[in-house]
Amino acid sequence: MSEPSERGETALSYTADEMMTVTAARALRDGMTCFVGIGRPSEAANLARATHAPNLVLIYESGTIGAKPGALPLSIGDGILAETADSVVSVPEIFNYWLQPGRIDVGFLGAAQLDKSGNINTTVIGPDYADPRVRLPGAGGAPEIAAACREVIVVIKQSRRAFVDHVDFVTSVGFGDGPGSRQRLGLTGAGPRRIITDLGVLEPDPDTCEFVLTGTYPGVSVADIKGRTGWDLQVGRDLSELPSPSPAELAALRGLIATMPAAVAGGAPPAAGAPAEGAVR
Amino acid sequence: MSLAEAIAAAMHDGDTVAMEGFTHLIPHAAGHEVIRQRRRDLTLVRMTPDIIYDQMIGAGCARKLVFSWAGNPGVGSLHRFRDAVEHGWPAPLEIEEHSHAGMANRYAAGASGLPFAILRGYRGTSLPSQTAGVAEVTCPFTGETLTAVSALRPDVAVIHAQRADPLGNVQYWGITGVQKECVLAAARSVVTVEEIVDELDPRPGAVVLPSWAVTYIAAVPGGAHPSYALGYSARDNDFYMAWDAISRDRALFGAWLDEHVYRAGGAAPVANTVLAGDTRSAR
C-alpha cells in the first residue's frame, strides 16, 4: 500500500501492517498501565512509548512491571524486559495481585479468530475440540486479561477466516452472548473497546455489543473491509478515515523493527492454516 | 551426583513431571537427559510447553500434557506438539488445558497443601467444558460465584537456577516465574544450576530455596539453552526461530534429536547434594 500523506508532506510509502501498528499505538494514552501480549501488541505498545506515550507502563505476563526495552523482545520473557523493569514479580503474583483486582487500564491482545461480539479463539479451529482442524497455542494469559483489564484492545489482521459469526471455541470472552453477558458472568472489566486491523477499526455498538466499522484507512473502501469479514459487518454512524502514519511514527516503528532478529523483522510467514498471530502472548 | 543420576533417581515411567521456567531458566539439559533415558508415559505439566516439551513429545516421552500456552514464543507453532494432537504422532497425546492464571494458582494450591485454589477466571469461556479440575464455587461470605481449580501435585519438579552453594541452597533471580510453587508442590525435585559458589551473596529480587526443600542438585552450566540464565547467558532467539523448520519435519526432527540429544551424551557431571525423601510436608 502506498498513499500520499494527508498533511501535504512528501508522499510516504507504508504497508498495511505498519498502518495497523501505528493505529494501535495511537490507541494508548500516556501514563496508562498496559498488559501487553507478544507480537504486534508489543510492537504497538513499544511504538507508543517511543513516540507520544513515554510514560506508558508496560506489563508482561512474565511478571515484568514497567519494562522499558530499548529493543523489541521476541518473547514475553526476554532478559531485556527483566533488566529494564521497575519490578519483577512471580507469575502467580502478576495474575493474582496485579491483573485480577482490576489495577490495569488496558489489555492489548492478538487473536487467531474472533466473532462479532468480540469473543476470541486462540485454542482450536474446527467444530470438534477432540479432533481439531488446527491446534492453536491455547489460552495463555488472555482469558483473565480479557476479563479483568479495565478495557481491552485487540490487534488482528482481517480475513473472512479470522472474522467469523461465532468462534469455534471461546478462549477469551468479549461481550459473550451480547448485552448484559459480562455482568452476568461477573467479568469486572468493560471488555473490548476496539478491534484494530490492517484495514480499519471496529468498535462495539453500545446497544447490541456487535462490532461495527468506525474507521477506515486511506485507500481502503468499506466494500473491501466487508469482503474480508465473515459476518454481515455494519457501518457505524460516525465512520471516519483515519490519518496515515506520520514520518516520525514510521521512522520510530522501523527503528524498533530493525532491533528484531532478521527472520521475524522480515515477516516470516506463518505456518499454513496456523496464524502466527494466534500467539496471544 | 550427575544430572543423569539425578534424573534416574527422581523420575520413573508414568510419573507426573513438571519442568518449569517461564521463558527464562528453562531446564533444557534436564529435558534432554529425560529423552536419553527414554522415560515413557509421562504426564508432562508446564504452563508454556515451549521447545523443551516439543522435543520430549516428539521423542515419545509423553502420554499427557497439562498446559496453558503451547506455542513457540514470537515465532509460531510447536510442530511436534501439533503433530501429536492433530495426527497422533509419535503417539496420541491426551491434553488438559487451562489459562496461565489457572495453572499458576494450581501450583500455588499444591505448594500450600490445599486441594484447590480460587480465582476470578474461566467464566464464560469454553475451557471448563473440556477441562477437568475447573468448577464453580460460591464465596461463603459474599455469595459471589468464583472459579475453583484443582491443585497440581507433581511427582517430580525440575527447574534450572543460577547458583547453589555447597550445602545445597539454591538461588535464582530475574524472571522467577512459578518455580518456587512448582518445587514446593512436588514430591521430589531436581535442580540444575549454572554454578556452585562458596556463598550466595544477595541479588535483587532473588528467590532462595533452602537445601531441605530440594531433593537433587546437579551443576549443568548452560543447562537452560536455548532459554537463558540472567547474568550468565542470553536467550538464543536464533535457535527459537531455527526450531520452526527443524520441528516441522519428522525426519529432520529425528536427525536433530539423534545428533544433539542421543549422541550428545550427558552434561559433564559435577558432584553435588543429594537429599533423599519426599520434600513435601507430611500429610
Image (cartoon, coloured by chain):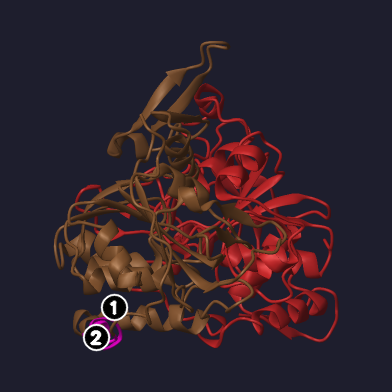
Type of the residue with mark 2? Leu
Q: Tag 1, which chain?
A: B
Label 2: which residue?
Answer: B252
**In the image, residue A13 above or below residue B67:** below
SS at mark 1 in the image: helix
| Residue B220 visible to the viewer | yes
Report how far apart the C-alphas of labels 2 and 1 lie in the structure.
Answer: 8 Å
Q: Residues within 10 Å of mark 2 (few under 14, many from 20)?
A: few
Shade representing chain B: brown
Q: Tag 2, which chain?
A: B
Q: Which residues are magenta?
A: B255-264
Contact, CB < 8 Å: mark 2 with mark 1? Answer: yes
Of residues A121 and B65, the one drawn nearer to the viewer in this rendering: B65
Judged left or right of residue A9, residue A268 is: left
Was residue B258 drawn as part of the magenta stretch in this picture?
Answer: yes
Label 1: which residue?
Answer: B248
Q: Which chain is red?
A: A
Pick the quarter of the image with the C terminus of chain B.
top left
